[in-house]
Protein backbone atom coordinates (compact mmCIF):
# COMPACT_ATOMS: atom_id res chain seq x y z
CA UNK A 1 0.00 0.00 0.00
CA UNK A 2 2.81 2.14 0.41
CA UNK A 3 3.46 1.99 -3.26
CA UNK A 4 -0.07 3.38 -3.82
CA UNK A 5 0.84 6.34 -1.75
CA UNK A 6 4.05 6.86 -3.76
CA UNK A 7 2.17 6.37 -7.04
CA UNK A 8 -0.47 8.91 -5.95
CA UNK A 9 2.23 11.38 -4.95
CA UNK A 10 3.99 10.85 -8.30
CA UNK A 11 0.69 11.28 -10.16
CA UNK A 12 -0.02 14.48 -8.22
CA UNK A 13 3.51 15.74 -9.01
CA UNK A 14 3.05 15.00 -12.75
CA UNK A 15 -0.36 16.68 -12.72
CA UNK A 16 1.11 19.71 -10.93
CA UNK A 17 3.96 19.81 -13.47
CA UNK A 18 1.50 19.66 -16.40
CA UNK A 19 -0.67 22.33 -14.77
CA UNK A 20 2.40 24.53 -14.25
CA UNK A 21 3.46 24.07 -17.91
CA UNK A 22 -0.02 24.95 -19.22
CA UNK A 23 -0.25 27.94 -16.87
CA UNK A 24 3.19 29.12 -18.04
CA UNK A 25 2.19 28.76 -21.71
CA UNK A 26 -1.08 30.60 -21.03
CA UNK A 27 0.78 33.37 -19.26
CA UNK A 28 3.22 33.67 -22.19
CA UNK A 29 0.33 33.91 -24.68
CA UNK A 30 -1.44 36.37 -22.36
CA UNK A 31 1.76 38.43 -22.11
CA UNK A 32 2.02 38.61 -25.95
CA UNK A 33 -1.65 39.53 -26.21
CA UNK A 34 -1.22 42.28 -23.62
CA UNK A 35 1.84 43.59 -25.51
CA UNK A 36 -0.18 43.76 -28.74
CA UNK A 37 -3.08 45.37 -26.89
CA UNK A 38 -0.74 47.99 -25.41
CA UNK A 39 0.65 48.73 -28.90
CA UNK A 40 -2.87 49.01 -30.31
CA UNK A 41 -3.94 51.32 -27.48
CA UNK A 42 -0.83 53.45 -28.03
CA UNK A 43 -1.56 53.66 -31.76
CA UNK A 44 -5.21 54.48 -31.05
CA UNK A 45 -4.13 57.19 -28.61
CA UNK A 46 -1.91 58.76 -31.28
CA UNK A 47 -4.79 58.69 -33.76
CA UNK A 48 -7.14 60.20 -31.18
CA UNK A 49 -4.64 62.99 -30.54
CA UNK A 50 -4.34 63.65 -34.28
CA UNK A 51 -8.11 63.65 -34.71
CA UNK A 52 -8.51 65.93 -31.68
CA UNK A 53 -6.10 68.46 -33.22
CA UNK A 54 -7.94 68.34 -36.55
CA UNK A 55 -11.31 68.71 -34.82
CA UNK A 56 -9.97 71.71 -32.90
CA UNK A 57 -8.78 73.32 -36.14
CA UNK A 58 -12.12 72.51 -37.75
CA UNK A 59 -13.99 74.12 -34.86
CA UNK A 60 -11.86 77.27 -35.13
CA UNK A 61 -12.53 77.39 -38.88
CA UNK A 62 -16.26 76.80 -38.33
CA UNK A 63 -16.38 79.58 -35.72
CA UNK A 64 -14.57 81.92 -38.10
CA UNK A 65 -16.98 81.07 -40.91
CA UNK A 66 -19.97 81.52 -38.58
CA UNK A 67 -18.71 84.97 -37.58
CA UNK A 68 -18.17 85.90 -41.21
CA UNK A 69 -21.66 84.69 -42.13
CA UNK A 70 -23.13 86.69 -39.26
CA UNK A 71 -21.34 89.86 -40.39
CA UNK A 72 -22.52 89.36 -43.95
CA UNK A 73 -26.06 88.66 -42.77
CA UNK A 74 -26.07 91.94 -40.84
CA UNK A 75 -24.83 93.80 -43.92
CA UNK A 76 -27.47 92.05 -45.99
CA UNK A 77 -30.11 93.15 -43.48
CA UNK A 78 -29.03 96.76 -44.04
CA UNK A 79 -29.26 96.25 -47.80
CA UNK A 80 -32.73 94.70 -47.47
CA UNK A 81 -33.86 97.63 -45.35
CA UNK A 82 -32.55 100.05 -47.99
CA UNK A 83 -34.37 98.15 -50.74
CA UNK A 84 -37.53 98.19 -48.62
CA UNK A 85 -37.22 101.97 -48.24
CA UNK A 86 -36.70 102.32 -52.01
CA UNK A 87 -39.82 100.21 -52.53
CA UNK A 88 -41.78 102.57 -50.28
CA UNK A 89 -40.47 105.53 -52.21
CA UNK A 90 -41.43 103.93 -55.53
CA UNK A 91 -44.92 103.20 -54.19
CA UNK A 92 -45.29 106.83 -53.09
CA UNK A 93 -44.07 108.01 -56.49
CA UNK A 94 -46.54 105.69 -58.27
CA UNK A 95 -49.36 106.98 -56.10
CA UNK A 96 -48.42 110.58 -56.90
CA UNK A 97 -48.18 109.79 -60.62
CA UNK A 98 -51.62 108.14 -60.57
CA UNK A 99 -53.11 111.16 -58.83
CA UNK A 100 -51.45 113.52 -61.31
CA UNK A 101 -52.62 111.41 -64.25
CA UNK A 102 -56.15 111.36 -62.86
CA UNK A 103 -56.10 115.15 -62.42
CA UNK A 104 -54.75 115.66 -65.94
CA UNK A 105 -57.34 113.30 -67.35
CA UNK A 106 -60.11 115.21 -65.58
CA UNK A 107 -58.78 118.52 -66.91
CA UNK A 108 -58.39 117.05 -70.36
CA UNK A 109 -62.01 115.89 -70.23
CA UNK A 110 -63.09 119.43 -69.38
CA UNK A 111 -61.03 120.96 -72.15
CA UNK A 112 -61.84 118.27 -74.71
CA UNK A 113 -64.92 120.01 -75.97
CA UNK A 114 -62.98 123.22 -76.54
CA UNK A 115 -60.31 121.28 -78.45
CA UNK A 116 -62.93 119.57 -80.56
CA UNK A 117 -64.39 122.94 -81.55
CA UNK A 118 -60.95 124.33 -82.29
CA UNK A 119 -60.13 121.31 -84.47
CA UNK A 120 -63.40 121.64 -86.39
CA UNK A 121 -62.71 125.31 -87.07
CA UNK A 122 -59.16 124.44 -88.10
CA UNK A 123 -60.53 121.81 -90.53
CA UNK A 124 -63.02 124.29 -91.94
CA UNK A 125 -60.28 126.88 -92.42
CA UNK A 126 -58.03 124.28 -94.09
CA UNK A 127 -60.84 123.29 -96.45
CA UNK A 128 -61.48 126.94 -97.36
CA UNK A 129 -57.79 127.55 -97.96
CA UNK A 130 -57.47 124.42 -100.17
CA UNK A 131 -60.48 125.49 -102.21
CA UNK A 132 -59.05 128.96 -102.57
CA UNK A 133 -55.72 127.51 -103.79
CA UNK A 134 -57.52 125.26 -106.27
CA UNK A 135 -59.46 128.22 -107.56
CA UNK A 136 -56.27 130.27 -107.89
CA UNK A 137 -54.51 127.47 -109.75
CA UNK A 138 -57.50 127.11 -112.13
CA UNK A 139 -57.49 130.85 -112.81
CA UNK A 140 -53.83 130.78 -113.58
CA UNK A 141 -54.37 127.89 -116.00
CA UNK A 142 -57.23 129.66 -117.71
CA UNK A 143 -55.31 132.90 -117.77
CA UNK A 144 -57.88 134.99 -115.99
CA UNK A 145 -56.35 137.74 -113.92
CA UNK A 146 -57.70 138.56 -110.50
CA UNK A 147 -60.65 136.21 -110.66
CA UNK A 148 -62.40 137.84 -113.67
CA UNK A 149 -64.38 135.66 -116.03
Image (tube, rainbow, N blue to C red):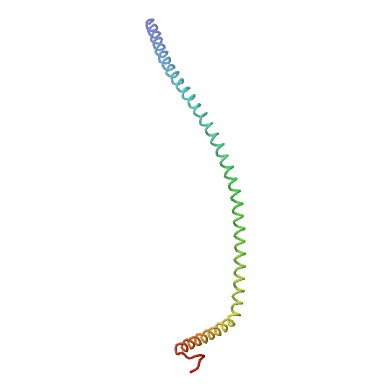
Give residue 132's position: percent from left, percent from top: 51, 87
Placement of 51 over or under 28, stated as above or below: below
For residue 102, what is the image quadrant? Answer: bottom right
Residue in the picture at 59% in, 54% down: 80
Placement of 13 over or under 56, stated as above or below: above
For residue 19, what is the image quadrant? Answer: top left
Give residue 106's position: percent from left, percent from top: 60, 77
Task: Point out the residue furthest to the top here.
Answer: 2
Q: How many marks?
A: 0
In depth, the one of 21 and 100 nearer the eye is 100
Give residue 10's position: percent from left, percent from top: 39, 8
In depth, the one of 4 and 51 nearer the eye is 51
Where the N terminus falls, by quadrant? Answer: top left
Residue in the picture at 45% in, 88% down: 141
Residue in the picture at 58% in, 46% down: 72
Placement of 90 over or under 32, stated as above or below: below
Give residue 83's position: percent from left, percent from top: 59, 56
Placement of 84 over or under 62, stated as above or below: below
In depth, the one of 83 and 22 nearer the eye is 83
In depth, the one of 82 and 25 nearer the eye is 82
Residue in the picture at 53% in, 31% down: 53
Amino acid sequence: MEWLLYASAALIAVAFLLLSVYIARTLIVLQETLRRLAAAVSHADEQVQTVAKEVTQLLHTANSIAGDVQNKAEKLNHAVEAVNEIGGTVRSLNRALRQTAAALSARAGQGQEKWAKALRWANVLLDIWEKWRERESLREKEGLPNGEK
